[in-house]
Image (tube, rainbow, N blue to C red):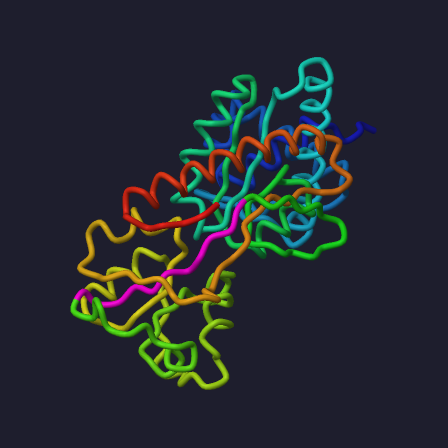
Amino acid sequence: MKSLTLKHLRYFTALASHGHFGRAADACSISQPALSVQIKEMEAIMGRPLVERAAREIRLTAFGEDILERAQDILERVDDLGNLSRRAAAPFSGRLRIGMIPTIAPYLLPTVIQALAARFPNLTLEPKETVTETLLSEMTASKLDLAIVALPISEPALQEFALFEEEFLLVRSARDAGNPIPSPSQLSAMDLLLLEEGHCFRDQALSFCDPANARPKQIMEGSSLSTLVQMVGAGIGITLIPEMALSLEIRSAEVSVARFPSPAPSRSVGLIWRKSSPLSAEILQIGAVIRKTAEAHLALHADQNGWARSL
């Protein structure tokens, strides 16, 4: 009897991804009959059907769903082995899978990618933007090499490396420019616009605004900082944004921006990666490049916006 091979797993994951034998065969650069033979062979080896076949599409069986999760994990780890062997011969080469949370990625990711590509030209950078919970899950599953998140994470299996600190700024209607800065308790009673559930920045903003006294019916949610700032520009409420987002988000909105008095709300941003990663030494050097890039980025935008800051 034939044994299961990596080829079986690659063809099966392609079929699951495309949901169609023809498209999956094209993606794998083989004929549709050849792909079908491989899938039937895999089903014979596994002893149960993996897919439900229809005229125009396929669906995975419950057993197929279970196998898919394990197949993807195996293929990721095989790819990791290939990258590690290449890096042993040539450090800072191969794939680097880097994740970022949505309240950092639009503002820092382009600059970081440029800096890393210039410093480590043999690295193939694969960025991903998603919320912290997903980044942690993919980090644990070895689907990411490192991530840029708000610290602390406090996961025993993960290493943390601080990059920079940034304050949260108050964004309100342009007609409110010059008005007194509301206190945290006053903020909680105002029309406060927040990111939707799942964003760590939402929790950080709420923790500053004394949510115990907030009126939930007046807390509105958005899917991005851009949405929140545009809503403020339209005269709907107020919001908080991280300092890094200032230049990009206020360009097309009629808003005013103010700093909070000390102690101002802020967050620490840093790198995380698995303590077990054999790339730890490389990641530390990559982290140093990202830190320098982020500090320069923040300083430049502070000058452009007339903000005084000390890094």
- Left or right of 188: which side holds 46? right
Residue at the spot 74% in from the left edge and 28% down from the top edge: 5
Residue that lies at the very extreme toward the top in this rendered image: 89
* Magenta stretch, residue numbers: 164-174
Q: Considering depth in this image, is 41 or 232 the residue closer to the camera? A: 232
Q: Considering depth in this image, is 95 or 45 the residue closer to the camera? A: 95
Return the x and y of residue 31 as percentages of the image width and height. Answer: 52, 22
Q: Is residue 252 magenta?
A: no
Q: Relative to 288, is 265 above or below? A: below
Return the x and y of residue 274 as percentages of the image width and height. Answer: 71, 42
Residue at the spot 46% in from the left edge and 53% down from the top edge: 166
Provide the major secondary structure of the magenta segment: strand
Which picture quadrant has residue 74?
Answer: top right
- Left or right of 175: which side holds 25? right
Return the x and y of residue 233 as percentages of the image width and height. Answer: 20, 63
Q: Considering depth in this image, is 131 or 59 the residue closer to the camera? A: 131
Q: Quadrant of the N terminus?
A: top right
